[in-house]
Amino acid sequence: MPGGALRVLLRAAAVAGAAVAVAAVHDAHDPGVLCPLRLLTGVPCPLCGSTTVFVEAGHGRWAAALLANPVTALTAVALVCGPFGPGRRWRQLSYAGRNLLVGAALAAAWVWELARLVLLRS
């Protein structure tokens, strides 16, 4: 098996194992809302839903995982698949390009979370 494929397989196994473990811990003891911003203000942050992504994925509910926070879910896939190209493309970006991409992803995640947790619940 080529090195890139082996690294992707190992990363996927680690992420899957972590997702199953997070789901099991969550089932045994649901800690409730973990986000300090959401606890204090009721307003979700861009990373809200990230734990839910792994809980839902650990239970095999892929659509629910994607809907909890699409940016987190897609970032996890990109990190797992890094050796197949996304990692090389990331390293080729300038620091300004990386910052712009991260900022745009966080902004998109925040809009998604505001719509999901605030606007759609009203």
Image (cartoon, grey):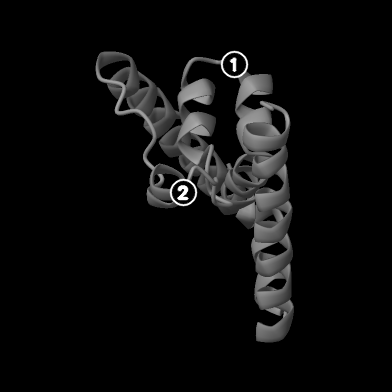
Q: Residue at x 59, y 45 (%)?
A: 72
Question: What's the CA distance linking mark 2 and mark 1?
Answer: 29 Å
Sequence order check: which comes first, mark 2 or mark 1?
A: 2
Residue 5: tell me if it is visible.
yes
Residue type highlighted by circle 2: Thr
Q: Mark 1: which amino acid?
A: Arg
**Farthest residue toward the left?**
29
Vertical arrangement, residue 97 with respect to residue 10, above or below: below
- The label on residue 61 is 1
Q: How many marks?
A: 2
SS at mark 2 in the image? helix
Task: Residue at 51% x, 40% y: name it.
Answer: 50
Residue 38 lies left or right of residue 1; in this view the side is left
The residue lying at 46 percent from left, 25 percent from top is 55
Q: Position of residue 52 (x, y in %)?
A: 49, 30
- Circle number at residue 41: 2
**Does residue 4 appear to the left or right of 25 in the view shown?**
right
**Residue 26's spot in the image, x, y percent?**
33, 22
Q: Position of residue 30 (x, y in %)?
A: 31, 22
Instruction: Please tell me whether mark 1 sits on a helix, a strand or a loop.
Output: loop
Residue 29, picture quadrant: top left
